[in-house]
Amino acid sequence: MRRKENPDDLLTAREIAVILSKNAGREISPNYVRVLASPRYKKLSAVKIDGRTNLYRRGEAEAIKIAERPGRKKREQ
């Protein structure tokens, strides 16, 4: 049985990148997740686990909307 997902679940940068990629419709890297959590942007809260590891809240990631990249045009198919 699958457990119910809690918006306060703590996930790795890679897992958050998957959520953001689904919302954005393009691939988002784990490095971009770290940028969103940086003091400059403060879009995500990082929970420090040890000196190297941060986890991020699922609910915050699901609320983020990533805009299209400026200056890039979509290809017509």
Image (tube, grey):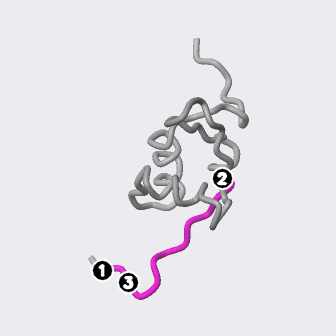
Is 65 drawn above or below residue 57 in the view shown? below
Is 74 drawn above or below residue 20 in the view shown? below
Q: CA distance from mark 2 to mark 3?
A: 26 Å
Residue corresponding to mark 2: 44
User: What is the count of numbered marks?
Assistant: 3
Q: Given the current orientation, which residue lies at the most extreme bottom position?
A: 71
**Between disc 2 and disc 1, whose residue precedes?**
2
Q: CA distance from mark 3 to mark 1?
A: 9 Å
Residue at 49% over, 52% down: 22
SS label for mark 2: loop
Instruction: State which quadrant residue 5 falls in.
Output: top right
Kind of residue at badge 3 = Arg
SS label for mark 1: loop
Kind of residue at badge 2 = Leu
Instruction: State which quadrant residue 40 falls in.
Output: bottom right
**Between disc 2 and disc 3, whose residue precedes?**
2
Q: Magenta residues?
A: 63-74
Q: Given the current orientation, which residue lies at the most extreme front position?
A: 51
Neighbourhood count class around disc 2 (C-alpha, 10 Å): few under 14, some 14–19, many 20 upward: many
57 vs 35, left or right, is: right
Q: CA distance from mark 2 to mark 1?
A: 31 Å
Residue at 54% over, 56% down: 23
Kind of residue at badge 1 = Arg
Q: Which labelled disc corresponds to residue 32? A: none
Residue corresponding to mark 3: 72
SS label for mark 3: loop
Q: Position of residue 61 (x, y in %)?
A: 62, 49
7 vs 15, left or right, is: right
Pointer 3 and pointer 1: residues touching (CB < 8 Å)?
Answer: no
The front one of 76 and 33 is 33
Residue corresponding to mark 1: 75
The front one of 8 and 39 is 39
